Amino acid sequence: RAYLTQHIGDIEHHSTYLFLKEAVDHLTRLVRAEISKVACDLHPAYLTTRLAEELVQGKGLPLIKVQHHHAHIASVMAEYGLDEAVGISVDGAGYGADGTIWGGEVLYCTYDRFRRLAHLQLHPLPGGDLATKYPIRVAAAILSHLNRHEAWLRSVADKLPYGVKEVEVILRMLEQKRMPMTSSCGRVLDSVSAILGICYERTYEGEPAMKLEAAAVGGEDVLKIEPLITSNILQTSNMVEAVLDNLRRYKVEDLAYSAEEYLAKGLAYLAVEAAEELGVKSIALSGGVAYNQHITTTIKKIVNKAQRRFYTNTLVPPGDGGLSLGQVAVACHIQQ
């Protein structure tokens, strides 16, 4: 059995951290649990990691640190009693095993281990966390792979807090190429949202991608771009460029739908190919992007057509609200 607390939210502030601590203490007493192991995220700077370290301090208990996207897929596996799965783990950000920021991953997972099989194209994040707040920065970074960023960035300078001055700073960062890199699916969706003029500033978690999903309702795949996959990496700069080039030709809803369709198809193709090579029957989808009904439905259709079983979260949220189930499922299977 697994007992989860009520929804706590982002553990970014001390008051929320204290509330989480109280909730854990209360639930532990309520179900009369005796702690034998503690699991947490791999990210060393998370407040949840600090809480986990406090819980084991001086008690001789093992602390199991679980990679973010492995935990997402393990949460689906735990729901359905799967021993293994090829997982599509897609979200905004998670600490990667290689030091980069992951978020668009195809993984082979059992509970005690995982292997990264494929992922989305890596893109720089100009300004780090600022790029998650202002998706114009991510769009410029993605377009910079094709040297298409400067003219577009100057055309939307008035949408940035510091206008032209900020544009110059972003251009310098992109030229110097000293930025964190990410394979995040959420950031790609954010960039499309900015290019289409849907959302220039994120004021709450997932806002640009959520507004993009709303805009895509009733749209159709007018771009019909075949997923470009090289060395198990789904290229995304070509899709973002195609959206930019067709702004005056097609409606916003059709371009939004086309972008989502491209990502869904590409990730599904990668997962199906991996499952066939490994002889794995189950494909699991999790992460915040799995809330997107269009993307989830498209992936499911392709997986089912390939005669693989498709699973996604139903008992717990596919976003970080269900992460603890995956973390504890992994911890239960690791002997330590």
Image (cartoon, grey):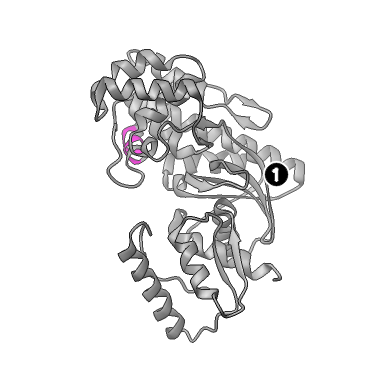
Identify which residue is drawn at 32% across, 42% down.
207
Residue denoted by label 1: 275
Q: Position of residue 144 (x, y in %)?
A: 47, 20
Identify which residue is drawn at 34% across, 28% down.
194
Q: Position of residue 280 (x, y in %)?
A: 72, 49
Which quadrant does the C terminus fall into? Answer: bottom right
Looking at the image, residue 202 sits to the left or right of residue 62; the answer is: left
Which quadrant does the N terminus fall into? Answer: bottom right
Q: Position of residue 201 (x, y in %)?
A: 28, 35
Question: Residue 276 versus residue 318: which sits nearer the camera?
Answer: 318
Identify which residue is drawn at 47% across, 45% down.
91
Q: Secondary structure at mark 1?
A: helix
Q: How many marks?
A: 1
Q: Quadrant of residue 317?
A: bottom left
Q: Main secondary structure of the magenta part?
A: helix
Q: Amino acid at mark 1?
A: Ala
Question: Residue 83 versus residue 330: which sits nearer the camera?
Answer: 330
Q: Is residue 213 magenta?
A: yes
As drawn, 317 above or below 94: below
Question: Residue 84 versus residue 231: which sits nearer the camera?
Answer: 231
Label 1 crowd bin: few (<14), some (14–19), many (20+), radius 10 Å: many
Q: Quadrant of residue 270?
A: top right
Can I make out residue 247 in this image?
Answer: yes
As drawn, 155 above or below 33: above
Can I make out residue 315 in this image?
Answer: no
- Magenta residue span: 210-215
Looking at the image, residue 49 sits to the left or right of residue 202; the answer is: right
Q: Is residue 175 magenta?
A: no
